[in-house]
Amino acid sequence: MKSDVTYFLCGIRVAATTGLTITPSTAPAAWPTLHVVAPGGSTAIAAAGGGWSASLVSGDHIVYLEGAETTWPGLTLALTAAGTLVTYKDELVEAWGATTATQADPKNPWPPPGKTEALANDTWFKSTFEALLAELQLSKGA
């Protein structure tokens, strides 16, 4: 069984190149790796300066943190420009416009903050979330 755990999984759609910063509420005992998945491939980013930073080009992305099992400190996600945050659960894509989001519960990482909106052209998000969830589940020996 793999010892790494996935702490959260979130989709992000941006209209232009946008900065992404993820900051934990307290420093974790072991820093997970941030993974940024886009239609053109994926990138792994190590924590630096008390969090993770990435530049997201225009389009769709899925980000997740994966690392050693430890106590989850919660986090704040911030974008430098307005974007659409996307969750996927039970084959349902939910989206809402935001520049920040706070996540405290690793079991229900991104409950939408109230009203969600329909997401046009959500095929990439659906197929990629499904593939990632299957891969992450299999990599843990489940």
Image (cartoon, grey):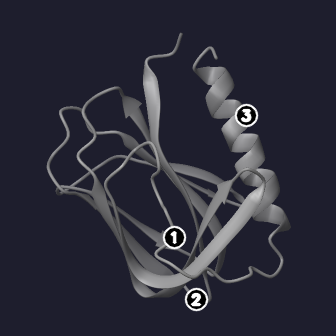
In which quarter of the view is residue 118 placed? bottom right
Residue 57 lies, in percent from the top left, at 58, 77
- Residue drawn at (29%, 58%), measured in percent from left and top? 75
Mark 2 or mark 1, which is nearer the start of the sequence?
2
In which quarter of the view is residue 24 placed? bottom left
Q: Badge 3 is on which residue?
A: 134
Mark 3 or mark 2, which is nearer the start of the sequence?
2
Label 3 neighbour load within 10 Å: few <14, some 14-19, many 20+: few
Badge 2 marks a residue whose secondary structure is: loop
Badge 1 marks a residue whose secondary structure is: loop
Q: 79 or 94, which lies in front?
A: 94
- Residue drawn at (51%, 15%), measured in percent from left and top? 2
- Circle 2: residue type: Ala
Mark 3 or mark 1, which is nearer the start of the sequence?
1
- Quadrant in which the C terminus is drawn: top right
Q: Is residue 5 left or right of residue 95?
A: left
